[in-house]
Each structure stands twice: as C-alpha cells, then as structure tokens.
C-alpha cells in the first residue's frame, strides 16, 4: 500500500462514433459552466435545444473518420501513457476523463479502496496550459468528486507545465525529425478560447487583453493566462529548435459561436498562407498531449483540405506527444516533482 497515488486526467471521448453516444458526451461537455459560461437556463436551452441536436450527427461522422480498431484515439493514447508512466514510478497510477468514462468519481472510489493508507493524491491534468475550459474544470471536477466522497486524502495538483524544461525538450524533440523535410513554415495551432475567458482568469482584473503587448509585460496574471502561456511555449520551443522568427507562428482553432475568440484563427491562417508564399506547411497542436478529434480530423483532414484548396501544396500534421519516450520521461519527472517525499530528496 502506498501513501501516494497518481491520477492522470484527460478530456474524454464518446463511447462510440455514433449519434447516440455523441449526444450525451456533447451535452456533458457543453453544459460545463466553465466551457459555456452563461446562466444555466440559457446554457441548457442553447445546448440541449440547438447545439446538440444539430451537431451530434455531424460530430459522429467526424469521430468515425478517426476511430481506430482499438477505439477512440484520445482514450487509447491516454491508456498507453498510463501504462508507460506506471512502469517509471513506484506509486500506483490511475487515469480518468473530465467528460465520459471513466469518471473522476468512480476512479477516486477505486483509488481509495485500493490504497487504504493514502495521504496524497497527485492530480495530473494533461493540459500544458491554464484555461478555465480545460485545466481549471478538470481540477474542480476532481475536487468536487473528492469532497462528495468524503475522502481524507489531500489533493496535490501538478501545475501547468507550459514552460517546464522537460516539456519543452519533449515538444522540441517531437518536432525535430520533421524539420529534415522541405518546409516553408511551422504553425503552432492551439485550441481556441473566448477572449472573455482570458479576462475572467485575470485575477488582477486589469492586465489581460488591456494592451497589444500585455503578454510581454511581467504580471502575476500570467499564472492563469492561456494566451501568455501558449506564446511562451511557442517561443521556447522555437528557440530550442533554432527556428528563425519568420519560420513559425501560432494560431487558435476550434472556435464555437460568434463571440470574439483569441486570434489569429487557424482557419484564416490556412487560407492566407499560400498567398504569402507558404506552400509547404507543418502544423502541430501543443495544447493536446494526445491525438484526438481536434488534431486528426480538424487539422489533418479538414485543415489539409482547406490549405490545399487555398493554393497550398502540402500540409503535414506533426503528431501529438502521445507515447514519445521524452514525453513519458517528462510525465514521470513532473509527477516525482509533485510528491512531497521526493521533493525533499531532490532539494
């Protein structure tokens, strides 16, 4: 029996690539108040009355396009990451999903049943960057399930690792082999979020998106600023790879609704790149550590088609970190840095 246990948490996936399975998954996801931050009655009306009925059949077709014989790519990669990192550390490792299965509640029950002397639960949200619709909602979901379960253990959360040297090393390492082929530009495409989310997580209430260079000005707001953190990841990775400034850029994908979201938009970049002489494009999606619908379908299929229709010659998607050995090593190191006893040993 261990005094510590590790809980990996990823986004989640429908059980199957069909409309009946996609409907409850989309409903759970979009009814999250940190994803669609509006009054519950209005969110329910829009999600259950409009979005889910219209989007579920289309989303099911998208999932079918990426589904593997093993199942959902995101689930499969998370399971493999779980097994590989379990081999590298002595503490028991578990995994759960924010939406879909396995849920935080059921996995927490299993953890505490199998580890009677548990004191520290190390929660590892598999999101490099802080956003209320990803990292924050994952943490709060586990905290709520932990409180409801009445457990005596203490939750210790692995912080966003967007600039951690081990993460940057793993990300750069995953990109490096792709630089041996001819390319004109590398696009770091991150999952988009509404501008209002950035402002909501600004605890100073006076920094984020208040000026064009707010991400360049030192501020405590950066601890929770998604935009600042993705810019930092991009620059650190590009620097480690020795990329010239004109050879790379960042953008935001997966926009929903008509509100202002962080810019530039990936879709517009893919349309405009060929007119600016970018014919051979490399794209990666560092907001995701596991390949999923947003990488395999939105970028590798839809994005590629859009880019080539706009005059581009080739779009190559660089896979997510998935089971890359450097990433598995990074996961193990981030976990060990969060375990109290090992913190003392390293200090």
Image: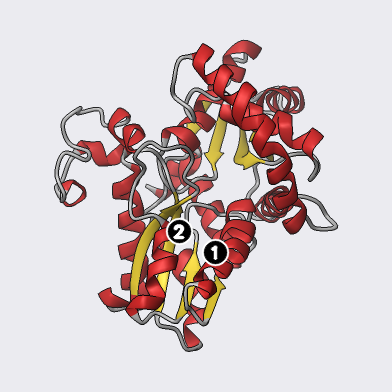
Residue receiving disc 2 = 267
Which residue is nearer to you in this view: 194 or 162? 194
Task: Give x and y (percent) for residue 120.
Answer: 55, 28
Tell which of 96 and 337 is nearer to you. Answer: 96
Q: Is residue 85 left or right of residue 318?
A: right
Q: Can you see residue 100?
A: no
For this view, does 158 lie left or right of residue 299?
left
Say few, some or many: other residues with alpha carbon within 10 Å of mark 1 (under 14 / 14 to 19 / 20 or more). Answer: many
Give the CA distance from mark 2 to mark 1: 7 Å
The residue sitting at 38% across, 72% down in the picture is: 273
Residue at image position (36%, 58%) is 233
* Picture quarter with the N terminus: top right
Where residue 328 appears, x then y in whole percent? 59, 59
* Image-based side of 3 in relation to 62, left or right: left
Task: Give the residue at mark 1.
Answer: 303
Asked if residue 306 is positioned above or below residue 74 in the image, the reply reads: below
Task: In the rendered view, tell whether residue 93 sits above or below residue 199.
Answer: below
Whichever of labels 2 and 1 marks the residue nearer the N terminus, that label is 2
Would you call the spot at circle 2 few (<14 residues within 10 Å), some (14-19), or many (20 or more)? many
Q: Is residue 294 left or right of residue 196?
A: right
Please, what secondary structure does the residue beneath circle 1 have?
helix
Which residue shows up at 43% across the image and 46% down it?
A: 192
Q: What residue do we see at 71% from left, 47% from top? A: 75
Q: Eyeballing the image, is 52 above or below 284?
A: above
Q: Are marks 2 and 1 in contact (CB under 8 Å)?
A: yes
Q: Nearer the viewer, residue 212 or 313?
A: 313
Q: Helix or strand or loop: what does disc 2 sit on? A: helix
């Amino acid at each position: 029996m261990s005094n510590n246990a590790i809980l990996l948490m990823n986004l989640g996936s429908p059980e199957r690539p069909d409309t009946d399975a996609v409907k409850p998954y989309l409903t759970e996801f979009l009814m999250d108040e940190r994803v669609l931050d509006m009054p519950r009655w209005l969110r329910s009306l829009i999600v259950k009355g409009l979005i889910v009925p219209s989007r579920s059949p289309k989303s099911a077709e998208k999932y079918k396009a990426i589904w593997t014989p093993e199942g959902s790519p995101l689930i499969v990669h998370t399971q493999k990451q779980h097994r590989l990192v379990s081999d590298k550390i002595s503490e028991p490792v578990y995994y759960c999903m924010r939406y879909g299965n396995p849920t935080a509640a059921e996995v927490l029950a299993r953890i505490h049943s199998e580890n009677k002397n548990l004191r520290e639960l190390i929660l590892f949200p598999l999101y490099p960057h802080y956003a209320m619709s990803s990292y924050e909602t994952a943490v709060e979901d586990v905290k709520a399930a932990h409180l409801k379960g009445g457990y005596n253990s203490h939750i210790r959360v692995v912080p966003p690792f967007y600039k951690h040297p081990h993460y940057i090393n793993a990300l750069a390492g995953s990109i490096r082999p792709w630089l041996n082929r001819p390319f004109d530009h590398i696009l770091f495409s991150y999952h988009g979020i509404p501008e209002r989310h950035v402002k909501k997580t600004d605890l100073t209430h006076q920094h984020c998106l208040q000026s064009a260079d707010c991400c360049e000005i030192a501020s405590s707001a950066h601890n929770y600023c998604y935009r600042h953190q993705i810019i930092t990841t991009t620059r650190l990775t590009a620097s480690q790879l020795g990329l010239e400034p004109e050879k790379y850029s960042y953008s935001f994908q997966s926009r929903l609704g008509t509100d202002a979201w962080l810019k530039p938009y990936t879709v517009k970049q893919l349309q405009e790149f060929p007119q600016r002489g970018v014919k051979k494009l490399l794209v990666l999606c560092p907001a995701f550590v596991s390949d999923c619908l947003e990488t395999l379908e939105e970028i590798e299929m839809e994005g590629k088609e859009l880019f080539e229709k706009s005059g581009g010659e080739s779009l190559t998607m660089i896979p997510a970190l998935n089971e890359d050995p450097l990433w598995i090593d990074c996961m193990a190191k981030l976990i060990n840095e969060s375990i109290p006893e090992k913190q003392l040993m390293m200090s």
